[in-house]
Each structure stands twice: as C-alpha cells, then as structure tokens.
Amino acid sequence: MHVYIEDIGRHEGAAVTIKGWLHNRRSSGKIHFLILRDGTGFIQAVMSKAAVGEEMFRAADHLGQETSVVVTGTARADTRAPGGYEIDVTALEVIGQSHDYPITPKEHGVDYLLDRRHLWLRSERQQAILRIRHEVIDAVRDFFNGRGFILTDAPIFTPAACEGTTTLFPVEYFEDQKAYLTQSGQLYVEATAMALGRVYSFGPTFRAEKSKTRRHLTEFWMVEPEMAYASLDDVMELAEDLVVSVVARVLDRRRRELATIERDTSKLESVQKPFPRITYDEAVKRLQDQGLPIHWGGDFGGPDETALSEQYDRPVMVSRYPAALKAFYMKPDPERPELALGVDVLAPEGYGEIIGGGERLADLDLLLARIEEHDLPQESFEWYLDLRRYGTVPHGGFGMGIERLVAWICKLEHVRETIPFPRMLYRLYP
Ligand code: 4AD
Ligand code: MG
C-alpha cells in the first residue's frame, strides 16, 4: 500500500510502498542504507542482499542522488531513526534516473544554489521553509476569515502609483495605454471596504526597487486588510492580533520544520500581547541616545530599524511618522498635522519592518491637495476620490509582507529563501 512518509507511524509492521526520490545513500558490502524522501519527510530504507537477492541489490549499487524510486518494504520502529521508523526493503523500482545531481551534500555558494533554485527546493531545509510559509499563509487566511473579513483581491495591472512613482514597473497595455504592476492593493481594498465593511486582499505586489538588501524583493506577496469605520488604534490592534495568531499557529503545527532549520523557538514563544507602542518622536530619541546619526524628519534605514527592534523581545509598533516621509493617502494627525497617522510594525531580532499601514485620509479636499503635492495625475485617481465624494468614513488598514514575516519566523539571513522563486534586482532566472 502506498503511504506517505509522514504517516508511516500508522503502518508499523505492515508492508508499505514509498514513492519518492533517493536523497542520499551509503553502503557496507551486504547492506545499502538508502535515505528516501517523498516531500512529506525523510526515511532510511535498509536493503540487504539477503532480502532482495543479488540482482536487485546490484541494481541499487549505482543509484545517483535524486533518482526517483518506488520502494516496498516493512515499516519498523527504530528509536535511533530521526523520524522514529525505518523500512526493511523487499523491492525497489527505478522510475527516473538521475546522474551527477548538481547539488550535493557539500556546501555550495548561494549564487550557485539560486541558479538551480528549481532543484535547491528539494533540500530538507528549503522544504521546511516552504512548509512554514504555507502554514503562515494558511494562518493569515484563517485569521481574517474567522473574523468576518471578506477576501476581495485587487488587480495587478493598475493605471497609477500607490506607493510612489519611483518604484513602478511599467507594462505595455493595449493601444498605447500604459499600465503598471501593482505596488499594493490598498486603494482597491479601500473601495471594497466601503462596499463590504471589513475586507482583505492577498496577492503578489511589485516594486522596482534597486535595493540589494536582505529585505527586498521586486515581487513579493502582501496581505492587506482594510476596515471601514476604523481608527489608527483599531489598525494597530488588528496588526498585533494577526502577528500573535500567526506565530502561535506556526509554533503549534510546524515544530518539526522549525527544528529542521534549527530555529530557537523560545524567541517565538515570547511573541505575546501587548506589543510595545512608541511614536516616531520617541524612536528618533532612542536611536540618537544609541549614537545613531538620525535626525527628526529622516526616514529609518535598515540599521535604524534593526537597532530599534533589537530593544524588544516582541514586535514593536512605531506610529506617527512625519507626513513628508509617507504616502499621499495617510491621514494627518489632527493635533499635529506634520505627522501622519501611520504605523510600522518592526519584528524583533533585527528583522525590521514587517507591516506598514494606518488611518487613511477620508477628507476630499485634503486628499485632492495631497495628490497635487505629490504630483500625481488626478484623472487616474478620480475613482478613488469618489470614495470620499459618496459617503466617506474614517477607515484604515495595513499591508504585511509574507516574505519578511517568514524570514523573521525562520530567522533567515535573507528573504530570498522564503519564496519558491525569488525575484530580485539581478535575479529573474529560473
Ligand atoms: O510599507 P508598505 O510599502 O505599505 C504599503 O504598500 C501599504 N499600501 C499597505 C497598506 O496599508 N495596505 O509595504 C507593506 C509591507 C512592508 O511592511 C513589508 O513587509 C512588505 O510590504 N514589503 C516588502 N517585502 C519584500 N520586498 C520589498 N521590496 C517590500 N516592500 C514592502
Ligand atoms: Mg513601509
């Protein structure tokens, strides 16, 4: 009977068939030790000459790494085995040969591996990271669905900028029309929030950022909730609940994967409510006290975010940035109009911003002035202005980048390992 390696414990003593690939092997004269993988786990299959006969034994002598094989045998509990079980092989069938597999157990450089990302994904560590990514996405969806948010996905071809004109990817549309790949679904979820109340979008977003940092991709996945009748405080509370809920879910269901990548889970256990809340003013003061060269009005760079987030054992929420640093749609603080009612959530352990959002500018005249100040083409935003013309309400939301979140949860060096096929400044292949 075909069983998946992760379910093998339910078949102890039974004859089972594993359909997978040869991950690794060693031999000692009369016994082959074959490490098999099938996507759900790894298991050692023990093949003795006595059990399979001379011919089949010899056929297994030269199997290369990643040969696809169907192996039948008896599942046996073994306390020394990593997954608790081994298989005593009675038959082995080769499905597809694999010679000179380019990724061996030895160390390879990251560029070499990225050029072979389509194969690198088969490694134990990359599989574990992608399983955690899957859990994160599933947890995010469950969180919003469980709270009555409606999924309303935003378009990917858009007529105008959302997050600033310098990071747009232009696309040729029909008959001399120019389109851009979306930087954020936000403007569209503001519209769907006015229809449905509480909504979210979840899709790919694009930034033509020529940044070569460990936090930047040119294509990344963002989840963007938006709520009608919501204030900055409501937005912050939602962000906090989301992050706590997702981390708890990964701890609950992905212990094995976290162990595979050697993640210190005690650091994740401390991700509990309440998250510290500080203002931009306070953040600047803290950074200056640490000797960093930031002045009021300056944007935080990677090193500033790292320094801030390292002071806490859980994410920190920084709010009320200078309006000049933020996008045109942010509501100004009524008490200090030079500030925007925006919030960034910075992850601990030096990971920096994982969430950005805030309360939106709901007033038509102020919004028109902002669009002009930012030199944006008003005609492309008429539909967005309509949201202020017909029954405007206070509202807000945020965007959370899945890759940044996964990089932190997995404590990875770089976001490039959090997505199956990363897109970066110098990386469009495979
Ligand atoms: O802070 P950002 O630019 O905010 C927005 O786009 C808002 N319109 C979202 C909203 O309010 N609905 O991006 C939000 C998040 C960041 O906090 C980060 O996690 C991620 O998106 N992000 C990136 N992730 C990977 N590579 C990049 N180049 C990213 N740029 C932003
Ligand atoms: Mg941001």
Image (cartoon, rainbow, N blue to C red):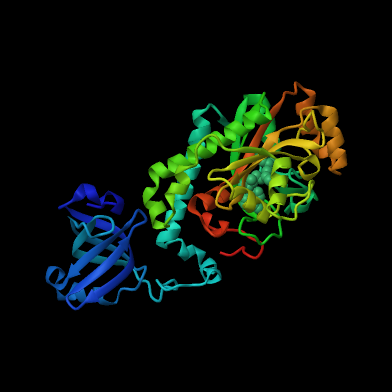
Report if residue 371 is visible in the image: yes
Q: Tell me where residue 422 appears, x and y as whole percent.
A: 57, 58
Which quadrant of the structure image shows residue 135? Answer: top left
Residue beneath the point at 29% across and 77% down: 62
Position above or below: 157 against 111: above
Which quadrant of the structure image shows residue 242? Answer: top right
The residue at the far bottom in this view is 29
Q: Which corner quadrant holds the C terminus?
A: bottom right
- Is 217 left, or right, of 104 in this rendering? right
- Is 63 left, or right, of 264 in this rendering? left
Front in this rendered view, residue 422 or 270: 270
The residue at the far left in this view is 50
The image quadrant where one finds ligand 2 is: top right
Q: Tell me where residue 39 appears, x and y as whole percent.
A: 37, 56
- Is 322 left, or right, of 314 in this rendering? right
The residue at the far front in this view is 289
Q: Tell me where residue 235 appears, x and y as whole percent.
A: 63, 32
Position above or below: 51 against 144: below
Residue beneath the point at 48% across and 53% down: 410
Q: Tell me where residue 333 appears, x and y as whole percent.
A: 77, 31
Front in this rendered view, residue 348 or 112: 348
Residue beneath the point at 85% across and 33% down: 368
Front in this rendered view, residue 14 or 97: 14
Report if residue 185 is visible in the image: no
Q: For the image shown, how many numbered marks are present on the structure?
A: 0
Front in this rendered view, residue 266 or 250: 266
